[in-house]
Amino acid sequence: MLLLALLLLADALPSQRQLESSLLEAIAASCPRRKVAIDADLTKACRAWADAAHQGAAPVSGDAVSFYASLESVEPSPVAGIATVNPPSNADRAVGELFPRSCLFNRVGAAAAEVTGVGAVVCALTADHTTDLKRIPGRVEPGGSVDVSGRLPAGLTLPRLFVTRPGGAVEELKLSVSGATFSGRVEIRQRGEHSLEVLADSPGGPQVVAVRRVFAGVAPPTRPPPEAVAAGAGLAGVEAAIAKLRASRGLPPLERDAELDLVAEGHSVEMVRLKTFAHILPTDGNLSDRLRNKGYAYRSAGENIGLSVDVTTAHEAIVGSPAHLANLLDPRHRRLGLGAAKGPTTEGGDGMYLTEVLAAPVVGSADPAGEVWRLLFAERKKKGLPPLQRDATLDSLASHEVRSVALKDGPIQLRDDVPGRAIEQEPELERVAAEILVLGAPDEAATSKNLAEPRWKRLGVGAIYASSKTYGPGRLWVVLLYGR
């Protein structure tokens, strides 16, 4: 009997303290310059997965661990490592192999549990903790609110707060910012899940620094969703998923654009080459730079990037981010570019870098001056203002001036003598106001500062599409001459 007891003891699962001690020792040996601490939330997530696996309620997969991490932790992208061992007593050895050898983390959690027919499952979650955040409850009652406050580290600025509501609507809420600290309040009125996300600007572009799932009046899910079966292969599947998502919100599908595909693919390839997951790279700049370099004229543009084992799960991670979801649901966008590249990640191993570029291109008009004139005429009528008479002499002068400025690619400035020359050519005019606009499309001319002045009687319009280093390709340059 004593021998049997000793054998059972020898095969027993190590204690939580033994597991954490072995993990920290292994990290110290591989990452001697990193200060790594045990994180209670990451530990709780690992424990929830291990217990669920023990009960047969969760699969042995990294995705399942990530599901529990999304419920327990605010870390935006923890890395999961899992293993099965037999006998269970080897769990403390296995856990020391489950962290990224890149050492780019400073928080860790671990847990293990016995599973019938397997031996034991072991979990380790690591995260690069950057932003100290006041604790946000995961469960609240409808009609309440939660405070979102914290402090950004050096190198991160301009925090922004996004919320995805239970119905799928995405809102950006105001944050009060003082130096590196920020604070805000999220009103929780509806029953259901509210997903909170804090972004900040980094040298590499926008960076998610915290994500929190808050459940109002409903219980959080207790087990991960079934392992997804891809709706389609590769980028075609991503395109179909985006179309389905937009259709569910009553938005038209995005037309696939070969030029945007090249922009997206180029950025994914460059991220792989530099082993850097970021919107802004030292080699290809930001999205505006990349579009300008391709000569792509746009009225609106947005970019999402994802990194995972394949493009499908990378896209799912993008949809799970309120700020990135807002890009996908932006009603202004009309075109879509997709690009992916496989390569090494900073965590070790290979990953799929996915880039999604969304845009509304500038579509040139055969008669841009006429379109601008008709828009301004209609806007005056809507405002109940006296109609403007189109003046051929002012048209001629405006056309000459817009070409003079746009084709020189210089400062956006009209010569001071333009109003005087207009009065010389039209002696009956007492006063002329001149303004120049650089637009994405004719309908943006409604921003004209002189449009609402009721005393103007005549209007001349000059318009031309031109590209410039300062304002980008294919912009609509407009000169307006108002007279009375």
Image (spheres, grey):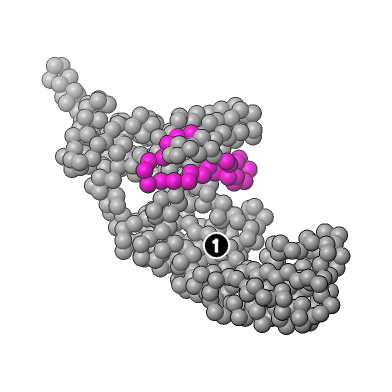
Instruction: Give percent across and percent down for residue 282.
Output: 35, 62
Left or right: 382 in relation to 242: right
State the SS at label 1. Answer: strand
Q: Quadrant of residue 78?
A: top left
Report the residue that reaches farthest toward the top. 2
Q: Position of residue 382 (x, y in %)?
A: 83, 60
Residue extending furthest toward the left? 3
Between 308 and 451, the residue placed more toward the observer is 451
Residue 161, horizontal then vertical, whole percent? 53, 42
Residue 211 image point, x, y percent = 47, 40
From this view, report whether residue 107 is shown above or below residue 385.
above
Instruction: In this rendered view, identify the residue nearer to me: 3 or 289.
Output: 289
Quadrant of the snapshot with the C terminus: bottom right
- Span shown in magenta: 149-174
Q: Residue at x 56, y 64 (%)?
A: 359
Q: Is residue 42 left or right of residue 386?
A: left
Q: Nearer the viewer, residue 149 or 266?
A: 149
Q: Which amino acid type corresponds to the residue marked 1 in the rendered image?
A: Ala
Q: Is residue 63 magenta?
A: no
User: What's the residue at 55%, 55% (across, down)?
Assistant: 327
User: Residue at horizontal 77%, vertical 82%?
Assistant: 425
- How many dots with numbers? 1
Q: Residues within 10 Å of mark 1 (few under 14, many from 20)?
A: many
Judge from the rendering whether residue 415 lies leftward or rightward of residue 236; answer left or right: right
Question: Is residue 422 shown above or below 9?
Answer: below
Residue at horizontal 76 percent and vertical 71 percent from the top: 432
Q: Quadrant of the N terminus?
A: top left
Q: Is residue 394 visible?
A: no
**480 to 38, vertically: above or below:** below
Which residue has dot 1 on it? 301
Residue 278 visible (yes or no)? yes
